[in-house]
Image (cartoon, grey):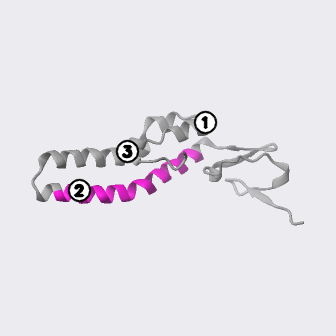
């Protein structure tokens, strides 16, 4: 039987049978070794979370650019202002205070702003 190994964020390799693994692998890139337990490095997890926000918001920003251009063509000041506001919220999403203050993975996942980004990939 082949041995299975787990690799942590620092590229350290451990035999899978000797460690306690998380069932949630969303933040696998933030795993760090602590005795026989793999835990998440919150700094690395926050970076992964912010990258996911950037990935999700890219098409949302592109779609909002279309909305803004249509409002511009129609000379609709209210629609332009709404679009500018929405794009600002999308740009600011990775800097949300809830992300910075999260001290657990559960709190980090809860920091996903569904009103700006849509459904959470962590639900």
Which of pointers 2 and 3 lies earlier in the amino acid sequence?
2
Left or right? Give the position of 74 relative to 94: left
Q: Earlier in the sequence, mark 3 or mark 1?
A: 1
Tell me the residue that label 3 is attached to: 116
Q: In the picture, which quadrant includes the C terminus?
A: top right
Residue 104, which numbered label? 1
How dense is the environment of label 3, judged by Cα within 10 Å: few (below 14), some, or many (20 and up)? some
Rendering quarter of residue 115: top left
Q: CA distance from mark 2 to mark 3?
A: 16 Å
Q: Is 52 inside the magenta-drawn segment? A: yes
Residue drawn at x 60%, y 41% as measured from the top left: 42
Q: Is residue 55 magenta?
A: yes
Dot 2 falls on a residue whose secondary structure is helix
Q: Which mark is residue 67?
A: 2
Outermost residue to the bottom: 2
Provide residue 67's location: percent of width, then percent of height: 23, 56
**Residue 100 drawn at (x, y percent):** 50, 37
The answer to whether 70 appears left or right of 3 in the picture is: left
Q: CA distance from mark 2 to mark 1?
A: 37 Å
Image quadrant assignment for residue 97: top left
The residue under the point 11% across, 56% down is 74
Query: Mark 1, residues whose alpha carbon is within 10 Å: few (<14), some, or many (≥20)?
Result: few
Sequence-earlier tag: 2 or 1? 2
Find the magenta span and give its range.
44-70
Regarding mark 1 in the picture, which secondary structure is present there? loop
Residue 96 location (% of width, % of height) = 43, 39
Q: Residue at x 22, y 45 (%)?
A: 82
């Amino acid at each position: 039987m082949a041995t299975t190994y787990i690799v942590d964020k620092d590229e350290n390799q451990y035999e899978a049978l000797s460690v306690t693994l998380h069932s949630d692998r969303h933040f696998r890139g933030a795993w760090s070794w602590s005795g026989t337990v793999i835990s998440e490095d919150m700094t690395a997890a926050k970076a992964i979370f912010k990258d996911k926000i950037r990935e999700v918001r890219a098409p949302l920003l592109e779609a909002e650019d279309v909305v803004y251009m249509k409002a511009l063509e129609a000379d609709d000041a209210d629609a332009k202002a709404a679009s500018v506001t929405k794009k600002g919220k999308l740009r600011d999403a990775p800097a949300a205070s809830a992300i910075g203050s999260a001290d657990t993975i559960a709190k980090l996942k809860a920091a996903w702003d569904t009103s700006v980004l849509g459904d959470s990939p962590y639900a």
